Structure formats: structure tokens, C-alpha cells
Image: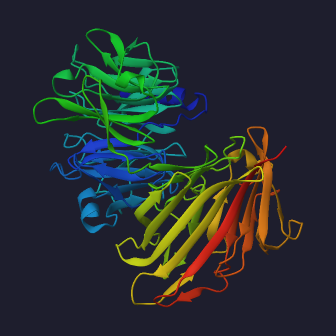
Amino acid sequence: MKRIFSAFLLAIAMTAPAAAVENCCYNMASGSFGVAWIDSIGEIRVFDGQKSVRLNGFYERGDKIAVLDLDGDGRDTLAVISKNKKALYVIDVEKTIETGKTVILSADNGNNIKGFCTAPAGTAHEPKGSVIVSTYSGSSYMWNKDYDGKGWPAIPGDFSQVSSGMLKAKMPAQFAVVTHGDVYTYNPAWMVYSQKLMGRNVNSTICGNFAPLTKEDEIIAAAEDETYIIIGNKSDALGKAVKCMTVGNGPEKDVLIAVDKDGVLCRYDRTEKAWTTLCEGKAGFVSVVTVPNADGTYTIYATSEDGLFSVSTDGKSAKLVDGLSKTRIPLKADGKVVAQFQTGGLFKPYVEKLYTPGGVQVLLDSPFDHIHHHGLMYSMGINDYEFWGEYSDKCAYQVLTKVDSDGSSVKAELNWVTPNGEVLAKETREIAAASENGANVLNWKSVLTPAGDKAVKIWGRYYFGLGMRFAEEMNTNVKFTNSTGAHDGAIVRGDERLKDCQWINAVGTVGGKGVSVTIEEKEGNTRPMTGYSMGDGWNAFAYMGATMRVHENPIMLEPGQSITAAYKVIVKDNQ
């Protein structure tokens, strides 16, 4: 009888509207290692209450993370879904921090994974440390370390997404799922689905840790325009739409902490049945967790693009405890901001924003199609490592050791470091803003020198060097020319072109306003400039750069030798 009921509900799910609901808020977790989150530039950071560390890996903005206890011994690990790889990774956080390299206990990218949730550990019906995953094809699977390499047992049903919430039921283990915006619970022991909330366009659920008023488990569901508490087949609306939520700890388990649609941190009191605003209405938060303290109280941790905040339980104060992920230095000319230098990038510091005199911002930072494209950036390959991409253990880091600014310029010193901590080269970088002939200008100079007593090889792909990713609107309207007066040069791939030239220019529109951006060679370059362009007519994305053709002819630098990249970037309003 239960299987018949299950089939009936699955038929409803399979005929529901096909629009998939993306779970965009599940990018923060807490465990024995502290608080972990994926910040706004796609970096996983772990904060232990005193300091934070970075986890190398395959992540990007919007990835999902959860705490997982593989052995039931209280030694937590992280489960991560990478959108880029469509894969599940189980990471040993302690060993990763200890070794400086990501220690992956298990990985699967053969099932085209889309969503996941962690199963209750140590129940009679589920192995410890299980993960339920969903795939883009609509199937769901159970992962456990005992299953790895032996095939994953399929969970029957057509589900476009597994939710972020688990139910730790009084009865055999259950979990809540979201399919096409509707909520169901699934009991693996009975293989039966139960309808909980229909037609509300739910995007995520969490376990109802509220002080129980009934013997039934509760689900808190965040829908597109409302938040619900579900008990059995009844649901109560709370009067606010949220994009991220968690529950209180200790004596306040009847409190819901959430981030609303405007990015404001807020609190719902079950007893008072009322919402209050926290942090004086500060906006821009994207995720939140609560962490119990030894004295029975708890701390709220919330993230924004500025970093990790510790929030008092009463919500009256918020302290930035890790702002390393976003640190910006404005560069001004004639009293106006020309550019913004980002010193806290994931793999490299870069110019995050660049403005025309009229205030139009022309750059795009870390888009989902290429998360390693950071505004205006400079990068090469050295020996066996590349400093351009951000997707494997062969990708290394540019680490700032010193930066000074006088308001219009920055002078920085950087170490080019491998994933295992070896410094291969040192760089001095100067970026100066100016206003010239109705245009905003950035003068860029980088000098790269071997760090030790061994020669290094400078290499790269055909686009390595100084490159800029343009604002998304320019993907469909950009036009290029160079100092020859044409848009010509050798076609490398698609409409990607290389041309030896003194300058290369891109024109297009951003926000309906015309812009013109030029990269011009300056004296002192180690090699003559080769212009790179992409996007004119191919409708992919708009990109422009200045290269040294190291893909054809790498540069060997002996100790004491250096290469210099010197360019002028000119930005105008184009009527």
C-alpha cells in the first residue's frame, strides 16, 4: 500500500512544471573545525574562532557545502558540490589545513551531480556519514564511504533537486526533498514519499529544530515569496520571504535566524510570532549559521562579499572577523575613483573595477563561465605551474607581501607561490591612476624576477599576460581595432585573434552607454606587445589583453634577470 502511495506522489512530481529551483543559499556550514563558507569570489575559508585558512580546490561562487561526519567520531569533514565539475567532493579539513593541499577522501563526477544533503548519521537505517545527491538527469543516489567504488545505490524517484535540509525523525530516518518547487519527505526504510507542501515554489528546506510542540518532525521551507513551518501536512506562513536560514542553539532553539530577500539579517521568535531586524538593517548578507558556545549561548556567523561577520545573539553588533576575502583600494584622479584594486583575491590580486570619466564600470569579476577571470589581471606560467587558472593543483598563487597606496597609485610586492608553498618568483607591481585628455588612465608596470638561485621558465597560453574581462553587456556589442587601423591578426580559435601592435582598442555599450577601452604599449617592455581579442561576432564573451607570445617562445630567466610588462590602459566615454 505504501509503495502504491509512493508511486502516486511520484506521478504528481513527474508531471509538475519543469522549471528547476536552484538552491542558492547553502554555502556555509559549521563543525568541529569551526565555520566554513564559500565567499563571494569562490574561495572556501575555514574560521576556527581565532584565524581563518584557505582551502585550495575546485570551488566557485554558489557552490554548496555541508558538514559530514564519516565515522561518527565527531571529526567533521566537508562535503562540497562543484558546479564547474558537477561533482561531489568529500574533504578532510584537518589534513588539508595541515598539509596545505586539499585532501579529498572521495570524489564522484560521473553522476552529473546537482544538489545534495547530508543524511542523519548513525541511525538504524542509514550508514554513518551518508550523503544524498541529486543529478541533472533527475535521479537521486545515496553516497557513503562504504559504497565508494562499488556503485551508488539509487533512491527511487524523479527529483530535480535534493534539498539542503535533513529530518532527524523520531521514527526511522527521513529527509526532505524539493522537486520542481514542491516539498516531499522520503523514508529510506519504507521507500515511501509523503507530500508536505505543494505549489509554493520552495527553494530550500532545513530541519525544524524548533522546540517541539508536537511529536511530529518539523520542516522549515523557504519559498519564493514566503517562509513556512510544516508540521505533518499542515503549514504556517511566517510572513517573510528569506533566501537563507538557520536555527538558534542552546536555550533558543525556537528562534529562526535568516537572511531576507534584501540581504538583511533577521530573527523570528516562535513564541512572539514576530520578526525583528538584526545589525541595524545592514544589507548584503548572503549566508548564516549559528554555533553553540561552551557557556550555553551561541554565536551567529554571517557572510557578505566583505567577509565573515560574528554577530551577537541580540543582533545589536556585528564584527568583521575575516575580511581577507575582499580588500579593496580605490585609485583616484582629480578626486574621482578611476579604479579599485582588489588585494584579497583567491589566487591573485587584480583591478576589480575600472571606470570611465562618466562613471561607467567596464569590468566583470569572476563570472560563472570562467571564475578565474578577474577584471583586469596579470598572470603567467612559471615552470610546471600556471598562475592564470583556478581549477587544479597545478594552479598557484600570487601572494601580496607588501602594498602601499597614496590614493592615486599602489606599489605592491608579490610572491608567486606554488600550492606546496615554494616561492618561484618575486614581483614588484605599480599601478597609477591619472586623468588625461578626457580619459581615465591606468599605468601598469610589473617586474618579475626569480626568487631563488635557480633559473625559471616563463611560459603561458596565447592569452597569458595582462588581460581584461569586459562587462557582460559587451559580450554582444564589442568591436575591436588595433594600431593597424583594422581588426586583423592570426585567428587562434573561433574569433580569438593575436596581432603584433602598439595598441588594441575595444568599443561597446554598458548600461546603454558607449565606452572605449585601449591597452597601449609603454617603453620598457621585455618584448613588443601582441594584442589579444575575443568576442567580436562570436557572441561568447568580450575579452582583450596584451601578451608576449610566451606560448610560442618561453622566456628563461636566470637568477637576477627579470621581465617587465609595462602598459597604459585608457578608458573613455564613447558617444
Q: Residue at x 71, y 46 (%)?
A: 356
x, y percentage for residue 373? 59, 58
Dividing the picture into quarters, in which one does residue 523 lie? bottom right
Dividing the picture into quarters, in which one does residue 18 lie? top right
Q: Is residue 460 above or below residue 194?
A: below
Q: Nearer the viewer, residue 105 or 557?
A: 557
Furthest residue toward left = 295
Dividing the picture into quarters, in which one does residue 547 lie? bottom right
Query: Can residue 545 be seen by looking at this rendering?
Result: yes
x, y percentage for residue 78? 31, 51
Q: Residue at x 69, y 60 (%)?
A: 569
Left or right placement of residue 104 versus residue 439 in this view: left
Left or right placement of residue 520 versus residue 397 in this view: right
Q: Is residue 567 above or below residue 40?
A: below
x, y percentage for residue 376? 61, 58
Q: Quick one: quadrant of the C terminus?
A: top right
Q: Nearer the viewer, residue 531 or 171?
A: 531
